[in-house]
């Protein structure tokens, strides 16, 4: 009926009455997206997924995929919701398919392309992932997850300088990472490791080792072993030795200062104290 503000007001009222209703958050997120409030849409849709990781509401809305979909099945955000839920449940192929359909239905919405690009990167389809993330970042240049996954795609496409540029910007956006939740610390940790691998490809071993150690410290214990195992033996030994030593405050302060130089394209000026 074209009464978007009134609809949003009703969703707000519903959430005041039932603040744990994932479906109401998802519908309000859709209204925000239609109104051009992509940041608000992201917040509401992320809240919906956090409350209902299996997206039971989306399955009810779409149908089971065999008996036919509801009339609203062409709504891109619902496909995106189900796609992310399938990924969370371990169905990577199904999630990628749904996210691809969402991006095809709405190629102008940055967060849809960002999520699709991330799914492509997780599947190792680096070229397509980079193109989707390029498009997403053209509209949302400071999106942290998109920067991380594009940097990872660039590194795997043998573009270490491009990867370094993305990781440096991500470091500049979150230079201290203190106070972040576990998922935020893990993203920052993996970003440091990706940056370290890019530095290694550019022959900067000492800088790479410092990033590897700092990045590994931010990961859960269960995630550190795969990082160590992926490295060549000499570097693995050096990293194990670095992790055995506590970081020094002065050393950390220098690293944060150096990150600013790298982000400004003046990494060569950074020297240890």
Image: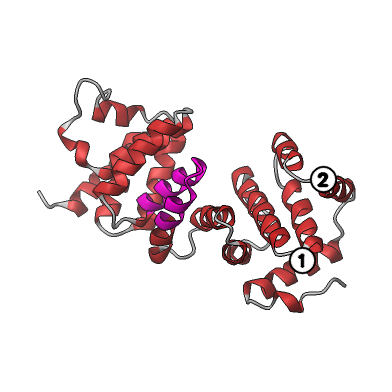
Q: Nearer the viewer, mark 2 or mark 1?
A: 2
Viewer-closest of 205 and 16: 205
The structure residue drawn at horizontal position 71% and vertical position 74%, both measured from the top left corner, is: 267
191 displayed left or right of 125: right
- The residue indicated by pointer 1 is 255
Viewer-closest of 186 and 180: 186
- The residue indicated by pointer 2 is 236
Which of the 4 quarters of the picture holds residue 210? bottom right
220 displayed left or right of 122: right
The structure residue drawn at horizontal position 31% and vertical position 31%, both measured from the top left corner, is: 58
Which of the 4 quarters of the picture holds residue 165? bottom right
Whether 196 is among the magenta residues is no
Q: Secondary structure at mark 1?
A: helix
Whether 68 is drawn above or below 258: the answer is above
* Magenta span of residues: 111-132
Q: Earlier in the sequence, mark 2 or mark 1?
A: 2
Whether 260 is drawn above or below 139: the answer is below
Question: Within 10 Å of the Cα at label 2, are there few (<14), some (14-19), or many (20+) other Cα atoms?
Answer: some
Viewer-closest of 229 and 103: 229
Q: Quadrant of the C terminus?
A: bottom right
């Amino acid at each position: 009926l074209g009464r978007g503000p009134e609809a949003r007001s009703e969703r707000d009222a519903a959430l005041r009455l039932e603040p744990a209703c994932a479906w109401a958050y998802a519908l309000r997120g859709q209204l925000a997206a239609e109104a051009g409030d992509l940041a608000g849409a992201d917040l509401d849709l992320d809240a919906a997924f956090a409350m209902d990781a299996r997206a039971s509401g989306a399955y009810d809305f779409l149908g089971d995929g065999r008996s036919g979909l509801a009339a609203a099945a062409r709504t891109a955000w619902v496909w995106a919701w189900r796609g992310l839920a399938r990924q969370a449940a371990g169905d990577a192929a199904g999630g990628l398919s749904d996210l691809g359909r969402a991006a095809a239905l709405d190629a102008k919405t940055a967060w849809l392309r960002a999520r699709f690009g991330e799914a492509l990167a997780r599947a190792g389809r680096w070229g397509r992932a980079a193109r989707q993330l390029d498009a997403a970042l053209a509209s949302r240049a400071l999106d942290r997850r998109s920067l991380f996954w594009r940097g990872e795609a660039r590194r795997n496409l043998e573009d270490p300088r491009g990867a370094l540029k993305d990781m440096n910007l991500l470091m500049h956006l979150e230079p201290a990472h203190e106070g972040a939740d576990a998922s935020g610390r893990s993203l920052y940790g993996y970003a440091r490791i990706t940056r370290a691998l890019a530095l290694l490809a550019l022959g900067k071993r000492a800088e790479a080792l410092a990033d590897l150690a700092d990045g590994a410290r931010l990961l859960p214990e269960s995630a550190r072993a795969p990082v160590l195992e992926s490295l060549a033996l000499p570097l693995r030994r050096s990293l194990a030795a670095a992790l055995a030593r506590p970081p020094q405050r002065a050393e950390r302060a220098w690293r944060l200062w150096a990150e600013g130089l790298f982000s400004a394209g003046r990494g060569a000026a950074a020297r240890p104290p």
